[in-house]
Image: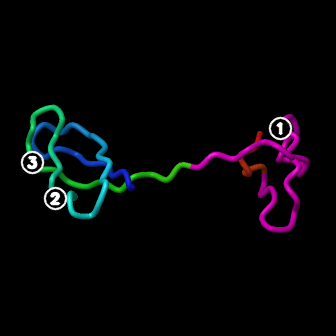
Amino acid sequence: MPIFEYKCNNCGKKFDVLHKSSTNMAEVVCPDCQSKSSKKLLSTFSASVSSSGFDGGASCSDGSCGVPSYGGGCASGMCGLN
């Protein structure tokens, strides 16, 4: 079930809607002003990475963060594990 982010065209409030099916996608109502006029926003993607198997105290800037160099690895300290 996808979650979409909307912005109300009436009051400007941003809110999320969990769509249980594609049939109720037109039934978006602002929770603040009850307006049915809203715009679907592009949401950011979020993912979490488990630290198991990685040395969380090591620095990626020197390549010692524990990520193997093949398949991505550290790119100038930008692996996000420190």
Helix, strand or loop at disc 1? loop
Name the one closer to the observer, 47 or 21. Answer: 21
Query: From mark 3 to mark 1, how far is it between C-alphas?
Result: 47 Å
Instruction: Tell me, yes or no, whether the highlighted magenta stretch contains residue 74.
Output: yes
**Which labelled disc corresponds to residue 26?**
2
Q: Which residue is mark 3?
A: 36
Residue density around tag 2, few if under 14, some if 14–19, many if 20 or more, within 10 Å: few
Is the C-beta separation of discs 1 and 2 under 8 Å? no
User: Which residue is at 85% across, 54% downward?
Assistant: 67
Q: Which residue is mark 1?
A: 56
Q: Nearer the viewer, mark 3 or mark 1?
A: 3
Name the one closer to the observer, 74 or 39. Answer: 39
Helix, strand or loop at disc 2? loop
**Residue at the top extreme of this rendering:** 32
Drawn side of residue 33 relative to residue 70, left or right = left
User: Callout 1, which amino acid?
Assistant: Gly
Task: Please state the horizontal and vertical placement of residue 33, each as a whole percent of the image.
Answer: 10, 34
